[in-house]
Amino acid sequence: GPGGGAPLENANPLVYRRSGERPVTAREEDDELPDSIDDREIFDLIRSINDPEHPLTLEELNVVEQVRVKVNDAESTVAVEFTPTIPHCSMATLIGLSIKVKLIRSLPERFKLDVHITPGTHASEHAVNKQLADKERVAAALENSHLLEVVNQCLSARS
Amino acid sequence: MRGRGIQLLSQVLLQCYSLLQEKEVLHLVLFYENRLQDHHLVIPSVLQGLRALSMCEVLSPGLAVSVLKAIFQEVHVQSLLQLDRHTVYSIITNFMGTREEELKGLGADFTFGFIQVMDGEKDPRNLLVAFQIVRDLIAKNYALGPFVEELFEVTSCYFPIDFTPPPNDPHGIQREDLILSLRAVLASTPQFAEFLLPLLIEKMDSDLQSAKLDSLQTLTACCAIYGQKELQEFLPSLWSSLRREVFQTASEKVEAECLAALHALSACLSCSVLSSDTEDLLDSFLSSILQDCRHHLCEPDMKLVWPSAKLLQAAAGASLRAYHCVTSSVLPLLLEQYTKHPQSSQRRTILEMLLGFLELQQKWGHVEEDESTLLSLRAPVCSVVFSALTDPSVQLQLVGIRALTVLGSLQALVPGFLSPSDLELVVDHLIRLALHEEDSQSSEAAMEAAGSLAPLYPKVFSGHMVPRLEEELQSERQEESPCDHRSLRQRCLQALAAVSTHTSIVRETVPVLLQHLRKVQKGSEAGNTQDMVSVCQSLHRVALQCQQDAESCWYYHQTVVPCLLAMAVQAAMQESTHLLLAKALLEEEVLAAMVPVISAATTHLSPELATQSVSHVVPLFLDGEVSFLPQNSFPCSFQPFEDGECLEAQRRLVALLMAFVCSLPRNVAIPQQERLLHELLALSCSCNCPFTATTAAKCFAGLVNKHLAGQQLDEILQLAVNRMELGLAEGPCRMQALTLLLWVTKALVLRYHPLSSCLTDKLLGLLGDTELGPAAADGFSLLMAESPDVLHKGCHADVRIMFRQRFFTDNVPKLVQGFHGAGPDVKANYLKGLSHVLNHLPKPVLVTELPTLLSLLLEALSCSDRVVQLSTLSCLQPLLLEAPQIMSLHVDTLVTKFLSLTSSPTMAVRIAALRCAHALTSLPTTVLLPYKARVIRALAKPLDDKKRLVRKEAVAARGEWFLLGSPGR
């Protein structure tokens, strides 16, 4: 990683601006009215995940975008597409795993989650997607303390 | 035996060294020097004796040197115990303090001797002393001779300091003490440069962030005493290390220290005095920076653009010369890049960088014309900034507006930078953005920019901007919807206030605002109230901006206060004579908006002018003396304190009296004060209108707070107490009496008046009253909180700084006792009162008082009153963060209560409970782990809360609980 001295795969990536905090509306402050879970809310869950390599968030690297998040609150489904910065990015699985874990920890159990690579943006797209969709594999990955450590770092609030 | 003997002698000497004669000292010294050769068990006592002798003033010349030589020769210091080593350092320190010349006679031998003494020292207490000795060696010019490198080695081997004080360390030495002490040694002489710089370069690459930071800070410290000569050889490596760190680091701290070091290097090179045959390295150093960074500025979307710009700005900010060198290359490049990149987001980045460089110019004050790169770039810079102002992207506009402010202030430094026509263009842009830009951020930013530029160009703004705003304010446009028209007027009002930052402009804007207020009052449009409130808000802002300037302040007071009073009196009389529809001007909202205007116009008056003003205002209210008002022909008389149904409207104006009379400086005498107090007291107890009664009570309290202590005050207070007791006893005015009690109690608590405890007890008693209890409980919040209009420091009230702590100490035990003795129907009142007191207490005090109250707070969590729940949660949340050890003892209760409150029917309680559940994670992990599974399971439910704001807190809390005890946290 950075600071360790090993050269980065992509040392000077394109950087995108962070969207601001979602403004709180009067409706949201009303005790009675329900707020349904929408795309922005899901995007807010994953946009500040740290990239495993750069001191940047997935949003700043444009790995995740709000337009690639689809939620259906009534049917309890969430689909997230993410875009690795380069087609051979070796971190793609790890990034996908971080997104998936973040959603598992943050969404009600009723939701069915689908996290996959934006079609045509990664060399091993199919293989990565298959791993991410495999519940047993994801569970096993989180038993691996090294992997869990990296995922947790991605999900920790940056100091 | 010898050991015991010498120990005794040494202890005696430590007591009486100051009484010894020169000859006695000589004998003792010779004896002790000889004893240094004795058995090693005796040595500690010998050293104690020598330490005593080293403090003798009558020590003959030559003895100090002889003692030190003997120690250097006979004692292997590092094989002694810590305390004995410390004794040796003390002897050396004592001699250095009193025998400097003699010691210097030893030449470099002294330095060498000391190096051997401290070589291998490990104890932090001794190191602090040893480092101080080295600093003195260098600072006082002791001969280092051939031992510079040895002296460096014997100290630099501790760099970077890696020391963690043991838990419960009684010596209190912190890592930071050692770091600073060592840094002072290493950065004390250029002679160390050739050894130190390679070490720093090596440690900057360390994996430890603390080592990086220490190296960078030491480098910065060195630059203050180094010259070009010392740096020369290392510049390329220093630069490449700094660049690597800034380009790669994730830490803002490391980045900031790198930039500070680069700034220091550039400053050092800029001001080194060079001999005639030396080449100036600043230019070549800067060109290597330019070479490595410049091309990144052309990639405004890429990660390295900002690190590069910051590096260049750090180097450029060091001196005017560096600034020229960097900006003459970078500014034209940025201007060109701006044109090349059409996207708003890219342009924004480029303009922000440009702005950074422009702002640096301000560091050097006035600049000669021919020295300025900027002047030659005048036209392109202006056109770039103006183009940003018309861009559809709000973000780019905002940067453009900031740039305008900077350009405007540059004019003062670089004369001729903006032509008069440029300035008019600037003002046109500001007006357009302020009034017509859809986005409120841009509009507000434009108003702020106008406010900061106006004092620099008062003529342009008063001649150009104010008339335009006035015209827009008065125009009656038919084509627009009333809603657009209203928001345009609103913007005009705000802009008029924002631009009133110069006394000549204030004289233009205040009449416009007052004129508009009159016009709105006469109009019959719906929504008048809101319009009047807006004018008052603008007037308030202008008042605040006038406060620091005595002339503007008096102008404002004289113009605005009589005018507002006249309008209010007029409206009140029309109402009392015709009993027409209520005038908007007399609505609570409008009167409440006038209060801060009058108050801000009064607080900063000089005592003389305030006295002049009070001699008009008080007779107006007491005697209907209207002659000083601008339009003073009124249909009937003004007598707000008289009885009578139809005078209700007049009585409301006590709010304006309060705003004025409670804001006066304390040394201004109020005419007929006692009569005024009686009238206010009567009004507060008897008036049926809650607004008027409360206002009268506040006004009474505000005056009582500032009233001179003595018989008069005691009498009026006694009267007030009697009225209150009467009112509280029974009848229709109990609520008014409680309000008066609250405000008078506050007035007295603030000034530590002896009567305050008696009044507080009455209030505590009322907590058990089924009718008034809840209101009395809420009153504790009023007592503790800062009130916005009266009884605060800003209006010269007598406020003792510790009043909250004192109130806490005096009354919390009573609240707790009251709670335990109270019946079930009123128990919540005591908890509520307690919550209010705790909520306003400074957190450090709260943390120390916590253990006694915690059980009650935990009980309060089970109280069904949501105000109690909410304030208890907001009280506990910071305690979880600041006193995790104490809170750990109650983890079981806390977890249970917090989790149960996450399903409260009230959103605010659910949010606060989740924040507390989140804050729990700062308790020690081992305490929490048994609860982890349960909490994570329980927090799954609020993840599906119907309110988004609750879900957000649940996500944050649950995420943190997942990380507990897990790798990578």
Image (cartoon, rainbow, N blue to C red):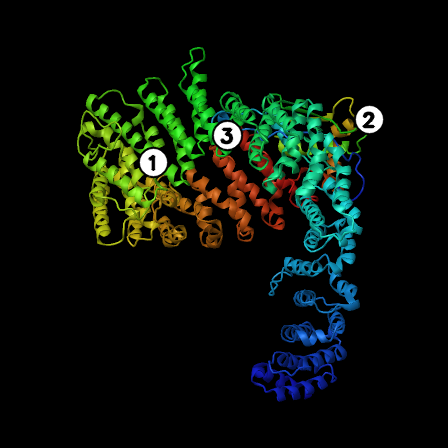
Q: Which residue is mark 1?
A: B557
Q: Which residue is mark 3?
A: B450
- Residue B910 or B721: which is nearer the viewer? B721
The image shows residue B599, relative to residue A68, as above or below, that is below
User: Would you say residue B173 is visible in this rendering?
Assistant: yes
Label 1 resides on the chain identified as B
Spatial distance from mark 2 to mark 3, Cα to Cα?
55 Å
Spatial distance from mark 2 to mark 1, Cα to Cα?
74 Å
> Marks 2 and 1: which is nearer the front?
1
The quarter of the picture where the N terminus of chain B appears is bottom right
In percent of width and height, residue B106 lies at 73, 75
Q: Are marks 2 and 3 on the same chain?
A: no
Of the residues shown, which amino acid type is indicated by label 1?
His
The image shows residue B122, relative to residue B26, as above or below, that is above
Look at the numbered disc 1 and give the secondary structure of its residue.
Answer: helix
Label 3 resides on the chain identified as B
Q: Are marks 3 and 1 on the same chain?
A: yes
Of the residues shown, which amino acid type is indicated by label 3?
Ala
Look at the numbered disc 2 and give the secondary structure of its residue.
Answer: loop
In percent of width and height, residue B809 lies at 39, 54
Q: Which mark is residue A123?
A: 2
